[in-house]
Image (cartoon, helix red, strand yellow):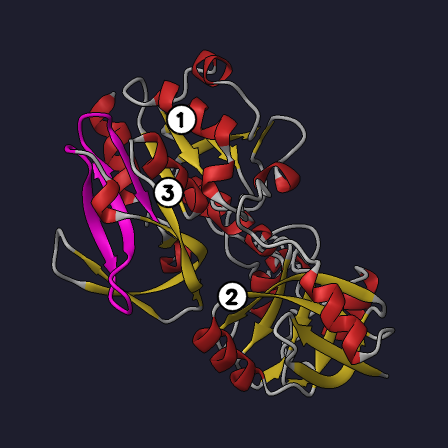
Amino acid sequence: MKAILALEDGTIFEGISIGATGTVTGEACFNTAVMGYQEIVTDPTYKGQILAMTYSLIGNYGIVEEDSESPAPQAAAIIIGELSNLHSSWRADSPMNDWLKRHNTPGIEGVDTRKLARHIRTNGSMRACVTTELCAADAVARAKEAAMLDGAALANQVTCKETYTWCGDSRPWKLPNKTAGDMTNYGTLAPATCKVAAIDLGIRNSTLRALRQDGCEVTVVPSTTSAADILAMQPDGVFLSSGPGDPAACVEVISTVKELLGKVPVFGLGLGHQILGIALGGTTARLKFGHRGANQPVKDLTTGKVEITAPNHSFAVQADSLPAGVEVTHLNLNDESVAGIICREKIAAGLEYTPEAKNGCTFGTFMSMINSAK
């Protein structure tokens, strides 16, 4: 079945429908990673966005349910060059197309996604429509009516409904037990040495695994949880998760973080990092097309080393807006945007990118803050 991707500027990309049929709208974005499509599509940070993968072949290792960052796809739709009809991973539970249909997520294959990425890089982020029903003109009109991320407090749509303690599996994947033939051999976890309250702004399963691997007993709370309720839990540290939308629109969370600062170590990741920057007195601004991929160079200004990172964001903390006492610790070398901050007086720090790609023990700054404050 034919499918159309229409951008608000009138640009049309045609392809073949995959996944669910119908019409969806959202803000178009692209990710340059060559693997991890399942983790990317299920990342709550993609809520409300139409996601294009620039790598040419998607679906070649299938879908492994335990690798999902959340229970279902979060992107409004997925745009790819070619969908693999065969999957090769011994861990796979289903082919990608079946998985998209099961979760009612539409997509298009046969699109030159690198051309699409160049178009967005040149012209900036824009609204889009994916449809199997509308003509091109109607699809463009629908795209123009779509919501942008600016001013959208999407974290409230993806946060958990109730507080819970993370007790899920804390290894990136299961290893086969050669004697019993089951899939439960995870190895040995270090004992929990501290209590962390994680404010769920769209938290990923891999983040929870990484915190647990670092020795944290993690209690996840909704984004609407008050500072008083969090402090009543007597946590050793507070973690602000990554998530979707405009950080400046998360007014309630910003207020909560302001109350927490100086009373307990606070660490922010992604959207959490941006919210922390605002709570410390800074501002954020929209990037032209955002940073999404697994190959972004970030310089650690404290060590001089350059890391290859996996960011996913449309907004960034403005360095010149930060007050005295708040230091920039990391810079994205592609555009010199802020990728990390620290405020030693308030015992608070944040990173824009995904550090748990290093397989745990990568929230070192957070753990050091907690240990020093004990």
Measured as percent of width and height from the top left, residue 41 is found at: 62, 62
In this figure, which residue is indicated by the disc labeled 2? 125
In this figure, which residue is indicated by the disc labeled 1? 257
At numbered mark 1, what does the secondary structure look like: helix, strand or loop? helix
Q: CA distance from mark 2 to mark 1?
A: 29 Å
Amino acid type at circle 2 is Ser
In this figure, which residue is indicated by the disc labeled 3? 273
Query: Mark 2 vs mark 1: which is more N-terminal?
Result: 2
Per the rendering, the mark at residue 317 is none
Which quadrant holds the N terminus? bottom right
Neighbor class of circle 2 (other Cα within 10 Å; few <14, some 14-19, many 20+) is many
Measured as percent of width and height from the top left, residue 8 is found at: 64, 70
The image quadrant that residue 321 belongs to is top left
Residue stretch in magenta: 324-351
Observer able to see residue 189: no
On the rendered structure, is 143 left or right of 256? right
Amino acid type at circle 3 is His
Q: What residue lies at 32% left-to-right and 50% top-to-bottom? A: 362
**Residue 127, placed above or below residue 70:** below
At numbered mark 2, what does the secondary structure look like: helix, strand or loop? loop
Q: CA distance from mark 1 to mark 3?
A: 11 Å
On the rendered structure, is 191 left or right of 10? left
